[in-house]
Image (spheres, grey):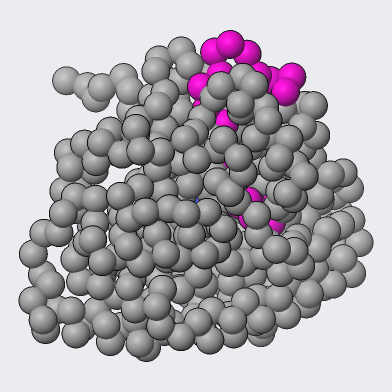
């Protein structure tokens, strides 16, 4: 007896693996600073929690329609129409348990075996994983530090073939914190029209862009019918464990996504959908406070890392990650990440957890308190200074 071959294509997610290792060290009495997981350390705002308990009391405990509660789909459509400056109706919205299922469903819905899918490298590991699961051909699009972890549109064009079915974009970007400016999005949109492919635009960090306005591919002419926009509540409202995400899907793909959802989840938890309406329609003060706090933490962490000889860190414009260059140090990404966890008690991720082009970098999440960030910088500084005499991994 053995498992199906298709499972072999699925990849793991290092953030959860490193979290497991860090927890095991904590169980042995070690003190660990957690910078590995992409999860805001703020509580979910009280009015959202209250809306969920109220919804339970009101009996929102049964199934909802597969695509989501009509009132939430309408609220999302209103939010998207305002923030992306296009006119979207609730009929184009699908609500899912977190944004991640939409990456899975979106790729499965459009990729046939042998189709080529271009995806960012370094990038969120689920992209490559699901492309492989769908028996597509993963084509990495290298993101380069010299371009603030973006790419030249000419380089993207060089990867396009007549088999290209889908391009995956993530702006603001995990793991680098980079983003795509409007001029790049316009050039990419022209390529999509010229070469006729879909774009999955993962905009889960759309509200976490500190120095620039967020622009969405969906707003550009001709993109409405070929863009699968993914967004959600996890990061913006500190709701990672609630599992609530959504997609804006071309009309001709809605029934495919509905079938995938129907055959896996049936629907998204009904009272959590009610809480989602409160999140979108209630006060946004807590979002603004969180964004301000992240911005301050980013400055402190970037400045602290740049004080450490051998580490060079750009100031990333978005998300809550930094992606420092460690190429001057004598260990590779994995070796340094292991060393820092075991010797210094700092849990973070090697750049290679996000693809081969992540070699020479680390990823640190600053979705944690200032004290923890300061402690991490001190520990990393001391451990790096001791590196010459440390064992090689
Ligand atoms: N896309 C990206 C780029 C992410 O970083 C994450 C979460 N780490 C997700 C999607 C998934 O979000 P959710 O928790 O809503 O499933």
> Where is 132 relative to 289, above or below?
above
Can you say which quadrant of the picture contains the C terminus? top right
Front residue of this view, candidates 5 and 146: 146
Q: Residue at 75%, 64% (x, y): give it.
A: 212
Taking the magenta stretch, the answer to whether it contains residue 164 is yes
- Whether residue 84 is visible here, answered yes or no, is yes
> Where is 171 relative to 228, above or below?
below
| Number of numbered tags placed on the structure image | 0
Can you say which quadrant of the picture contains the N terminus? top left
Front residue of this view, candidates 110 and 372: 110
Percent from the top left, x then y, of residue 362?
70, 52
In the picture, residue 332 is in which quadrant? top right
Percent from the top left, x then y, of residue 38?
53, 62
In the picture, residue 387 is in which quadrant? bottom right
Percent from the top left, x then y, of residue 166?
52, 27
14 displayed left or right of 172 = left
Report the span colored magenta. Answer: 157-177
Q: Residue at 82%, 73% (x, y): give it.
A: 304
> Where is 289 relative to 350, above or below?
below
Q: Residue at 30%, 50% (x, y): give it.
A: 91
- Whether residue 355 is visible here, answered yes or no, is no
Q: Residue at 62%, 66% (x, y): give it.
A: 208
Taking the magenta stretch, the answer to whether it contains residue 14 is no
Percent from the top left, x then y, of residue 15?
51, 54
Front residue of this view, candidates 113 and 324: 113
Front residue of this view, candidates 116 and 324: 116
């Amino acid at each position: 007896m053995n498992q199906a071959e298709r499972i072999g294509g699925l990849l793991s997610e290092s953030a959860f693996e490193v979290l497991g290792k860090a927890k095991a060290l904590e169980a042995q009495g070690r003190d660990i600073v957690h910078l590995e997981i992409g999860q805001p350390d703020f509580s979910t705002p009280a009015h959202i929690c209250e809306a969920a308990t109220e919804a339970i009391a009101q009996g929102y405990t049964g199934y909802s329609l597969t695509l989501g509660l009509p009132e939430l789909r309408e609220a999302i459509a209103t939010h998207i129409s305002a923030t992306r400056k296009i006119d979207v109706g609730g009929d184009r919205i699908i609500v899912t348990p977190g944004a991640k299922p939409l990456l899975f469903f979106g790729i499965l819905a459009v990729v046939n075996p042998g189709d080529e899918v271009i995806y960012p490298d370094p990038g969120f590991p689920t992209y490559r994983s699901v492309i492989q699961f769908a028996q597509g051909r993963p084509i990495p699009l290298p993101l380069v530090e010299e371009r603030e972890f973006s790419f030249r549109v000419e380089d993207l064009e060089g990867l396009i073939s007549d088999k290209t079915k889908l391009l995956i974009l993530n702006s603001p970007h995990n793991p680098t914190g980079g983003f795509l400016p409007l001029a790049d999005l316009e050039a990419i949109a022209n390529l999509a029209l010229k070469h006729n492919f879909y774009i999955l635009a993962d905009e889960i960090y759309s509200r976490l862009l500190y120095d620039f306005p967020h622009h969405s591919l969906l707003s550009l002419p001709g993109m409405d019918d070929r863009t699968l926009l993914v967004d959600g509540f996890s990061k913006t409202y500190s709701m990672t464990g609630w599992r609530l995400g959504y997609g804006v899907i071309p009309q001709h793909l809605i029934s495919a996504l509905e079938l995938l959802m129907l055959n896996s989840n049936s629907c998204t938890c009904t009272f959590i959908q009610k809480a989602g309406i409160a999140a979108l329609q209630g006060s946004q003060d807590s979002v603004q406070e969180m964004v301000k706090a992240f911005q301050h933490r980013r400055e402190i962490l970037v400045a602290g890392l740049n004080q450490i000889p051998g580490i060079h860190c750009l100031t990333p414009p978005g998300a809550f990650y930094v992606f420092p260059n460690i190429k001057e140090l004598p260990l590779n990404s994995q070796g340094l990440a292991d060393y820092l966890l075991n010797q210094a008690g700092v849990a973070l991720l090697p750049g290679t957890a996000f693809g081969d082009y992540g070699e020479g970098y680390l990823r640190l999440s600053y979705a944690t308190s200032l004290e923890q960030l300061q402690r991490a910088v001190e520990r990393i500084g001391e451990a790096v200074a001791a590196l010459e005499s440390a064992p090689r991994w």
